Image (spheres, helix red, strand yellow):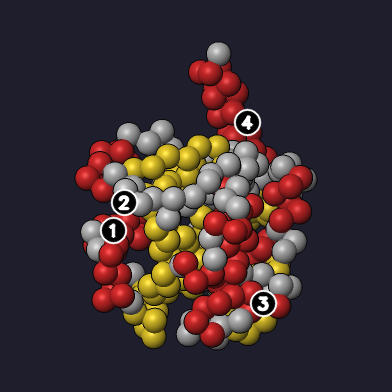
């Protein structure tokens, strides 16, 4: 029964990927009418546009920030964050994004990846990355059902920023200044099925084997961080301050 359900979900995902574009000559245009209504509404939220030095220069919808321009093949640069959540045993939570997601659906990633919103004034606050911390608290509650009173903005360890880009499927992609937040705490997790299809905790010495056995690809940002920095940070959860780099933006 479970196998049949996953086959149906897989077929639906393939259909969505096929239907999410309209051919105009050799160009592709995004279509939203074929996607999940909740995910489509979320694309109206306003992200914070930034330049390559992370200076805020305006706002644009999530749809505009993730759409690959059919003329230039570019994606607009905006501010984002990635939360890496560990329990007190040192195990890391990974999630599988739901098939309903418009960008990078049905992929494995770290605990939470999202954006501070321009329309939420407090999330624009840059001092000590407070806006990012507040946005992370909000999204952990929305995606994973973690009660807000279990995580406070001060609980996040802000390590650094990473500038990366990925063209995704050629229609929806990423181009972000990504704030890296670490959090080690035992929390209540009740995933939102519209956002997350699976959660699991991984042990440090099992990460490579576990990833090799995933039945779906990794998100590009998780793959990048895993390859370049994650294992070193994970090995030093109790002395992360020595790895802080808050002035330089990492570019891989």
Where residue 226 appears, as percent x and y from the top left, is 32, 56
- Marks 1/2 in contact by CB < 8 Å: the verdict is yes
- Marks 2/3 in contact by CB < 8 Å: the verdict is no
Give the class, few, some or many, for how many residues have Cα within 10 Å of label 3's Cα (few <14, many ≥20).
Answer: some
Labels 1, 2: front one: 2
Where residue 221 appears, as percent x and y from the top left, is 43, 59
145 lies left or right of 203: right
Residue 90 is labelled as 2
- Marks 1/4 in contact by CB < 8 Å: the verdict is no
Distance between mark 1 and mark 2 Cα atoms: 8 Å
Quadrant that contains the C terminus: bottom left
Label 1 element class? helix
Labels 3, 4: front one: 3
Distance between mark 2 and mark 3 Cα atoms: 31 Å
Please give the name of the residue rendered at 70% of the width and 58% of the height, measured from the top-left corner: 43
Label 2 element class? loop
Above or below, comparing residue 196 to residue 10 in the picture:
below
Please give the name of the residue rendered at 31% of the width and 38% of the height, measured from the top-left corner: 210
Residue under label 4, please give it.
Answer: 12
Residue 116 is labelled as none
Name the image quarter holding residue 233. Answer: bottom left
Pick the residue in front: 79 or 83: 83
Quick check: can you spot residue 26? no
Instruction: Identify the mark nearer the N-term, 1 or 2.
Output: 2
Residue under label 1, please give it.
Answer: 234
Distance between mark 2 and mark 4 Cα atoms: 36 Å
Where residue 227 appears, as percent x and y from the top left, is 29, 57
Residue under label 3, please give it.
Answer: 122
Distance between mark 3 and mark 1 Cα atoms: 30 Å
Please give the name of the residue rendered at 29% of the width and 44% of the height, measured from the top-left corner: 203
């Amino acid at each position: 029964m479970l196998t049949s359900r996953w086959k149906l979900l897989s077929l639906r995902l393939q259909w969505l990927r096929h239907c999410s574009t309209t051919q105009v000559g050799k160009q592709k245009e995004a279509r939203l009418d074929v996607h999940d209504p909740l995910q489509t509404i979320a694309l109206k939220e306003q992200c914070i546009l930034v330049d390559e030095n992370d200076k805020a220069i305006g706002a644009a919808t999530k749809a505009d920030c993730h759409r690959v321009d059919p003329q230039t093949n570019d994606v607009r640069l905006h501010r984002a964050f990635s939360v890496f959540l560990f329990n007190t045993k040192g195990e890391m939570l990974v999630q599988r994004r739901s098939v309903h997601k418009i960008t990078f659906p049905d992929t494995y990633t770290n605990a939470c990846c999202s954006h501070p919103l321009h329309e939420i004034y407090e999330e624009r606050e840059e001092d000590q990355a407070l806006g990012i911390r507040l946005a992370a608290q909000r999204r952990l509650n929305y995606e994973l059902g973690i009660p807000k009173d279990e995580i406070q903005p001060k609980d996040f360890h802000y390590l650094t920023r990473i500038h990366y880009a990925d063209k995704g499927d050629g229609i929806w992609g990423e181009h972000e200044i990504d704030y890296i937040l670490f959090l080690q705490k035992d929390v209540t997790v009740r995933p939102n099925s519209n956002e997350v299809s699976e959660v699991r905790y991984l042990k440090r010495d099992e990460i490579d084997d576990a990833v090799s056995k995933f039945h779906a690809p990794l998100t590009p940002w998780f793959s990048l961080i895993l390859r370049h920095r994650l294992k070193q940070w994970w090995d030093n959860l109790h002395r992360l301050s020595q790895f802080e780099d808050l002035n330089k933006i990492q570019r891989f």
